[in-house]
Image (cartoon, grey):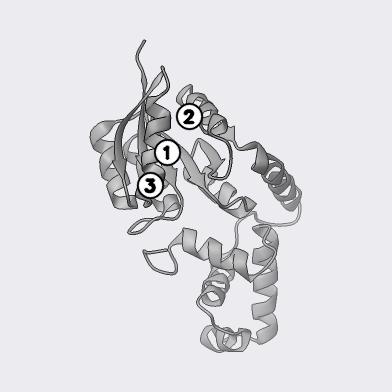
Amino acid sequence: MNKLAVFLVDDHAILREGLKTLIDSQADMRCVGEASDGLAAVAGAQSLSPDVVVLDVSMPKLNGLQATEQIVKCCPRSKVLSLTRHSEDSYVQQLLKAGASGYVLKQSSSSILLAAIRTVAAGQSYLDPAVTGKVVGGYVAKAEARRTGPLEPSDRENEVLRLIALGYSNKEIASQMSVSVKTVEVHKANAMRKLNMRGRIDIVRFAVLQGWLGENQ
């Protein structure tokens, strides 16, 4: 039986060592390589052509969203399984949209991770049971939004989110964009509704995934 080739990407060496031991202990899996940042993840996926890339979301040089997009584009036979401690639906939906085949929380049991690896390697999608309800709820909300407007924030709405994440006040944003403070508030509210955000921390997390705050997280 050919073993599933798994490539591990996480910037914490201790976690990688634990995951490698877990994977190599399985009769149907083997760890074929490791990386500690997003750029090395893309390079490793290209050179190793693994069945599954277990990819951390928060990494230096290139974050998980950006690395996922590049791996999906350059290595279509390799499935990306996102591994993170973040359960927010905005994270899940952004990574699935980028092409990830699955999403597992670091705080979940090892059996869930192993099941996820086998599932995505077989060409199916896998969502950690702890986030499934949130994702379904998010998609229901977006389906409802189709009746009233576009699903994605407009360029102006994205710009407002970016400036908020960078720490600018509504008044400062209004000045920069040459609009009223009320307009800024409307753009912010519309963007948060479309992305199912609840507060500023969600805006900052979204900005990190978009690469608006720099390469490092």
Which mark identifies residue 123?
A: none
Residue ID at (39%, 68%): 214
In the rendered image of this protein, does residue 174 appear above or below residue 216? Answer: below
Three-letter residue code for mark 1: Val
Mark 1 and mark 2 in contact? Answer it, CB < 8 Å.
yes
Q: Residues within 10 Å of mark 3 (few under 14, many from 20)?
A: few
User: Which element type, helix, strand or loop, lies under badge 2?
Assistant: helix
Q: CA distance from mark 1 to mark 2?
A: 8 Å
> Mark 2 is on which residue type?
Ile
Residue at 57% in and 36% down: 109
Determine the secondary structure under disc 1: strand
- Which residue matches tag 3? 14
Tell me whether the residue at label 3 lies in contact with that at label 1, contact meaning CB atoms closer than 8 angstroms. Answer: no
Tag 2–tag 3 contact (CB < 8 Å): no
Q: Nearer the viewer, residue 102 or 173?
A: 102
Residue 137 location (% of width, % of height): 73, 46
Q: Residue furthest top?
A: 1
Lower sequence index among marks 1 and 2: 1
- For residue 198, above or below residue 45: below
Q: Earlier in the sequence, mark 3 or mark 1?
A: 3
Give the CA separation, mark 3 to mark 1: 15 Å
Quadrant where the N terminus is found in the figure = top left
Task: Say which residue label 1 marks.
Answer: 54
Q: Quadrant of residue 63?
A: bottom left
Which residue position is annotated with label 2?
Answer: 117
Q: Residues within 10 Å of mark 1 (few under 14, many from 20)?
A: many
Q: Nearer the viewer, residue 80 or 173?
A: 80
207 shown above or below 172: above
Relative image position of residue 104 (x, y in whole percent): 55, 40
